[in-house]
């Protein structure tokens, strides 16, 4: 877990764990606890806005997506959370494989395109975004490397010790990298692992959180971070102007950020109220307001120039259910065959 939780507009900090109110009201006055995997500033603003608009207090705990699956599974007998908010949907599928989710088809899901929702309501998409590379042009110059434009460019020894990525067992971002390689190898998981075996000699560090390598690149600690492209855009806008966002030329998969209801949630009505709200344009425009440029799934939510245009990049389409079902085994193989997951 990277941080503490916050309680609505009052920002009560609960040191690393959540607590729940005893009342459950979908009509206001109740509360819920959300397991949130998007960037911290977006989690905070989403909970504050929901609490203020809907009269139900949303607390949250921020974790990386893989950690979130593990934490929910560990507390399955007595769920700590009511809702999972954030991507990628393959992590929601992995949670459903462990029996951790309850289907819920929100009335507001009607307007969400089919490719961004599970037909049975296990998860519903709130945004989508591309995987990419985030390169520091100053460091590239220092090490005498060109801007890497492809997955194969990353294997060049010129990048030895100058690339970082998160570990796919803890991070949804890194699992997106893994699944991109599975798709690029026509579904061959051994070949995908072989790629990461080859890349390993260029990796300085496997971080726990998906966006960490983008900050490392921004600080000049490495030349290239493998992260969501929209996280790189965020870091550039926040002042790391030596960074450049790259969409790999062979293509990459995309994440669908999703929202889902946790099985045996203590506050199911408040949870459904939150899910309904998360699908509205107002909720989905909070991304832009906090400098997070994932593309909204609600067609009525505003799209800005900072967001990726699907027609401009090589997008690998993939079966989210298949990627989610493979997650547990594939990340265990990464752990055993490539590198163990970081403890801190
Ligand atoms: N960054 C952004 C913008 C996201 O939408 C998500 C998904 O929730 C993540 C990062 C995932 O973080 P991690 O890779 O740490 O699981």
Image (tube, rainbow, N blue to C red):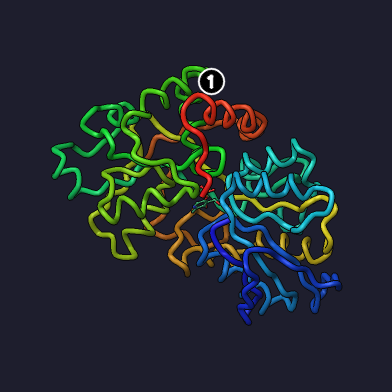
Whole-percent x, y for residue 227 in the image: 41, 45
The residue beneath circle 1 is 189
Q: Residues within 10 Å of mark 1 (few under 14, many from 20)?
A: some
Name the side, left or right, on which 5 lies relative to 341.
right
Whole-percent x, y for residue 290 in the image: 47, 68
Whole-percent x, y for residue 61 in the image: 63, 62
Whether residue 167 is situated above or below residue 191 in the rendered picture:
below
Name the residue: 53% across, 67% down.
286
Furthest-bottom residue in view? 10
Residue 320 appears in the picture as rendered? yes
Name the residue: 63% across, 46% down.
113
Whole-percent x, y for residue 184 in the image: 45, 24
Q: Is mark 1 within 8 Å of ligand 1?
A: no
147 or 160, nearer to the observer? 160
Name the side, left or right, on which 151 lies relative to 37.
left
Name the residue: 28% across, 60% down.
240
Name the residue: 62% across, 39% down.
90
Residue 312 appears in the picture as rendered? no
Name the side, left or right, on which 275 lies relative to 263.
left
When asked about the image quadrant of residue 324, the answer is top right
Whether residue 74 is situated above or below residue 10 in the rendered picture:
above
When asked about the image quadrant of residue 82, the answer is bottom right
Name the side, left or right, on which 35 lies relative to 128.
right
When asked about the image quadrant of residue 200, the answer is top left
């Amino acid at each position: 877990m990277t941080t503490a939780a916050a309680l609505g507009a009052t920002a009560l900090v609960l040191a690393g764990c959540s607590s729940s109110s005893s009342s459950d009201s979908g009509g206001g006055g109740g509360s819920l606890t959300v397991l949130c995997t998007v960037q911290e500033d977006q989690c905070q603003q989403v909970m504050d806005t929901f609490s203020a608009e809907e009269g139900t207090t949303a607390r949250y705990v921020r974790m990386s997506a893989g950690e979130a699956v593990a934490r929910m599974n560990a507390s399955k007998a007595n769920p700590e959370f009511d809702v999972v908010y954030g991507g990628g949907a393959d992590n929601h599928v992995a949670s459903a494989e462990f029996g951790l989710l309850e289907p819920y088809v929100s009335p507001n899901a009607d307007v969400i395109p089919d490719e961004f929702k599970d037909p049975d309501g296990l998860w519903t998409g709130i945004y989508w975004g591309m995987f990419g590379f985030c390169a520091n042009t100053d460091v590239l110059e220092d090490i005498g490397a060109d801007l890497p434009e492809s997955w194969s460019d990353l294997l060049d020894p010129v990048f030895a010790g100058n690339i970082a990525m998160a570990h796919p067992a803890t991070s949804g971002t890194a699992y997106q990298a893994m699944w991109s390689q599975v798709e690029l190898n026509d579904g061959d998981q051994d070949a995908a692992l072989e790629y990461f075996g080859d890349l390993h000699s260029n990796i300085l560090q496997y971080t726990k959180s998906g966006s960490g390598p983008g900050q490392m690149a921004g600080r000049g600690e490495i030349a290239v971070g493998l992260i969501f492209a929209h996280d790189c855009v965020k870091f550039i806008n926040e002042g790391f102007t030596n960074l450049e966002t790259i969409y790999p030329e062979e293509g990459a998969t995309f994440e669908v950020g999703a929202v889902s209801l946790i099985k045996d949630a203590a506050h199911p009505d408040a949870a459904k109220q939150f899910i309904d709200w998360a699908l509205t344009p107002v909720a989905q425009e909070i991304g832009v307001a906090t400098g997070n440029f994932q593309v909204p799934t609600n067609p009525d939510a505003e799209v800005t120039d900072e967001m990726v245009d699907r027609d401009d990049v090589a997008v690998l389409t993939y079966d989210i259910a298949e990627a989610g079902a493979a997650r547990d085994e594939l990340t265990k193989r990464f752990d055993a065959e490539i590198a163990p997951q970081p403890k801190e």
